[in-house]
Amino acid sequence: MVRRAVVGIDRPAIPESPAQRDIELLSALPKLAAKILLTVVIGGFLGATLVRVAPGFGMDEEELDARLSDRSVQALRDAHASDGNLFAFYFRYLNRMMHGDLGNSRTLQRPVSQLVAERLPETLKSVGLGLLLGWTLGFSLAVAVVMSRAWYLDLLGSLLVGVLLCLPAAVLALLFVLALAPARLLLGLVVFPKIFRYSRNLLGRSAALPHVLTARAKGLGNMRLLLWHIMPTATPQLIALLGVTVSVAFTAAIPMEALCDIPGIGQLAWKAALGRDVALLVNLTMIVTLVTLVANSAADTIGKPFRTVEA
């Protein structure tokens, strides 16, 4: 008898236990934290580089004062000479940062750590309210469109989204100022189009799956159909969308706070850009980069168990 080796037979994959997934997640956290830290440092350096190569760097508005003597003008230039060498400036900045010193703002004459501690809660409040409003409106409208399958509701939502996408955040902020509307609601209108479009597409794709169509044909109610058949399939992508909208809202807060006179990080970044305040701009660039990376990484980490279960 000749024994033949059977080749090409796929063995069934052994599903991972929750304990194994937790161990893999904990082991991946240090590597993820190192990537985030490295990206934040590179982002801060690139932000400082853009300020350094921008036209007019090294000039101060005080030099335009005709009452100043040549010696006073030279003293002003010597005071900013330390920022001329970008690598030396960034090396000193990283050295101070490791000792808990974020430097001093040249334009506001205050420690950067105090400015960030005062203004960051205002920005977080605006971002939180904007995300709450945007997700409430966008996701609710997407659910209504998918579950009702009404073409006129889909058309109305698409027209509203198209109008909002054509208006930049700065233009919306100006309209809010002219209308004396609550400025913090602006971020909700900024993230609403993205939430509605992607949520509608994700829910619509999940609603078209064979098992969902079978459940609908058997007379299952819309609420139960949504919670038990559509949402489990769309949840990982919705969690990823949440991470993206956090970074979108945080970025849109800069023109909103600058134009609506809200004392947050965005207004601080605008003043730092006008004054070419390198120390302040580097810190704000690193904060925006850190928030973006943490939000996206957290959404990816939270959504990974759902993708594993789905697979």
Image (spheres, rainbow, N blue to C red):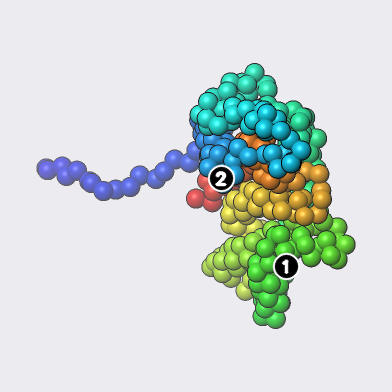
The answer to which image quadrant residue 107 occupies is top right
What is the crowding at mark 1: few (fewer than 14 residues within 10 Å), some, or many (at least 20)?
A: many
Between residue 95 and residue 215, name the one nearer to us: 95
Q: Earlier in the sequence, mark 2 or mark 1?
A: 2
In the image, is 302 to the left or to the right of 8?
right
Q: Is residue 28 visible?
A: no
Q: Three-letter amino acid code at disc 1?
A: Leu
Q: Position of residue 6 (x, y in %)?
A: 22, 46
Q: Position of residue 193 (x, y in %)?
A: 67, 64
Q: Three-letter amino acid code at disc 2?
A: Ala
Report the residue at 60% width, 57% height from top. 234
Disc 2 to disc 1: CB gap under 8 Å: no
Q: Position of residue 136 (x, y in %)?
A: 76, 59
Residue 54: give its label. Answer: 2
View extreme (left): residue: 1
Report the residue at 63% width, 24% height from top. 97
Instruction: Name the element at disc 2.
Output: loop
Residue 141: give its label. Answer: 1
Answer above or below: position of 213 versus 306.
below
* Real-space Cα separation, disc 2 to disc 1, in angstroms: 44 Å
Q: How many marks?
A: 2
Report the residue at 56% width, 45% height from top. 54
Between residue 204 and residue 68, name the one nearer to us: 68
View extreme (bottom): residue: 152
